Image: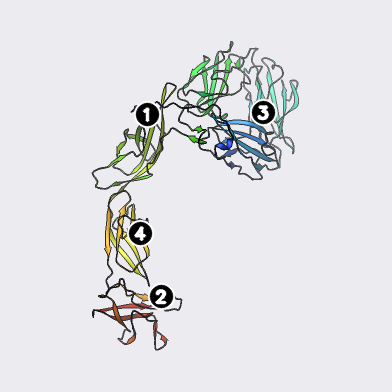
Amino acid sequence: MRKNWDIRLPRLLGLPIFFIAFLFGTLKTLAQECPALVSPVDGTSMVFVDSSISWEAVTGVPGYIISLGTSSGGNDILNEQNVGASTNYTPPTGLPENTEIFVTITLFFFNQPNIICDSQRFTTAALSEVPDCSPSISPADNSMDINTATNIIWSAAPGASGYHLTIGTTLNGNEILDTIDVENTLSYNPTIDLPTETDIYITIIPYNRIGLATGCSTSVFTTAAAAVLPLCSSMISPFNGETNVPLSPTLEWKEIANATGYRVSIGTSPFETNILEDAILFNPSTTIIDFEPNRTFFITIIPFNEAGEAIGCIQETFSTLLGCGPYFDPVSGELLVLNPSLKFPDIISICRGNTSDIITAPDDADGYRWYKLDSRGNETLISSTENVSITEEGEYIYEAYDIIEDSGRLFECASSKVFQATISQAPVIENIDIQISVNSLNYIISTVTNGNYEYALDNENGPYQDSNRFNKISLQNHTVYVRDKGGCGIAQRFVEHDLTVNGFPNFFTPNGDGINDFWQFIPPFQTEENNVSVIFIFDKFGSILAQITPNTDGWNGNFNGKALPETDYWFKAFSTNNKIIKGHFALKR
């Protein structure tokens, strides 16, 4: 996990952030990509009614709003639920069975109009059995001293389309509520307070088109003596729905006269409490340090006293906008960020034996940090300047940041990347394997050590290639270059073709397929001094089988019109300067 390091300010840009409150024009000014459904995928059928809905995250989008309907763009199932930065939503009461459901994702922005994406759809499966019983009921079974104004809450039963609720003061009793259909809801607020200091029996029977759940048990709790619950509170600062909230705000809410304290939860989606979870506060305010910029936060405040907690308190929201972006530019129609743009490579090479191992940041920024990563991913700061000395292979993190000032507050906008450091060295050519074909050569280059090398032919400046093989190159002498990609050096070798070795194929295949059907001298390079004038071909007994010259197709493997067998044959060639070259080759069929 990235640590919060102390900031040493090398200089101040004094750059203000321009927040845009309203934008004019069409939404198409911003070419923003809409997310695809991840689960269920668009067009899927036979989806379980208790499935969650998830979609791709979109870069630069601070929040999402989801609607569900039975027609394209419809919201008759769910009307514009803001889920913050979450890319997942689970309908609390499930989905209707055997229904084509349209999902509409709206991209939520603080400083520009929202973007409504095209609907995607899936079809739910038909139910095949009655639902299960509800997994849990609140107040919990056998709980004591429950406030008489409590609500009855239960969790969704998979496959349920509604619930029958019965409330009584005896087992199987119904004198408080006589088995009513509360439809597809998960809570019930009794119209009058429950009797004090009394056992209350709750029976909830889920149902669907097929029938009622079976075997559902009755839970019981005991009410407390008469007491007055506190009312719900509401946000004063920031107010519900406020945007452009500072990153370290003081949160204030309305004080409730008979409340002894407040239970506060804050999250980045309606379903999370990842910022603050059930914090007990005794004053109607608190200060949160370093909210994340450009995010929507969801806050729930529940007053309480000795009688219990306030009932039915709603969740409120506020949004931060101060930060590094992205910000919408109405001129270019693009999203802009204040983080430095990085050009640092994914891999760097350290030259073995090089006395200078200093790496310099290539990007323009106010400050830099370099971290070494160990095998467990822990970070160690090794430099806070633009230069770093790296002597070991492994994973590192490079970070560049700019210091931004806005509304009297300094903060940094940072960009970082993980890179790999490898040890390299100057290449040494070990061998060049030369393969001769009819009109060209193939080179295969091997080096003494394996390295991050690249290869070129005849020109030290390239072009270079990653492959160590050159195919179908001209029949002449060449110079091979091998270069270390990390800049550790270049090796070269001149490859000269000796007439006594090269130019005479070591085999041929006279099988009539049009490939290598003739054996013939192939001159590596043409000069008057080394050109062959005549070649004699012998069998192993020394009998002459053929006489050929370089201006013919060559020998076809026949003698007196008959094909000779597979074996080795010998040749004697005379050059124009009266030099004699001898050797042998194989006939293969």
Residue 249 percent across, percent down from the top left? 48, 20
Asked which secondary structure carries label 3, the reply is loop
Residue 129 vs residue 274: left or right?
Answer: right
The C terminus is located in which quarter? bottom left
Above or below residue 304? Residue 479 is below
Choose top left, top right, bottom left or bottom right for residue 431.
bottom left
Please name the residue that numbered disc 2 is placed on. Answer: 516
**Mark 3 against mark 4, which lies toward the viewer?**
4
Please name the residue that numbered disc 1 is placed on. Answer: 5
Looking at the rendered structure, the kind of residue marked 4 is Asn
Give whichever of 309, 247 is nearer the camera: 247
Closer to the chain start, of discs 3 and 1, is: 1
Closer to the chain start, of discs 1 and 4, is: 1
Residue 240 vs residue 208: left or right?
Answer: left
**Mark 1 against mark 4, which lies toward the viewer?**
4
Above or below residue 506? Residue 27 is above
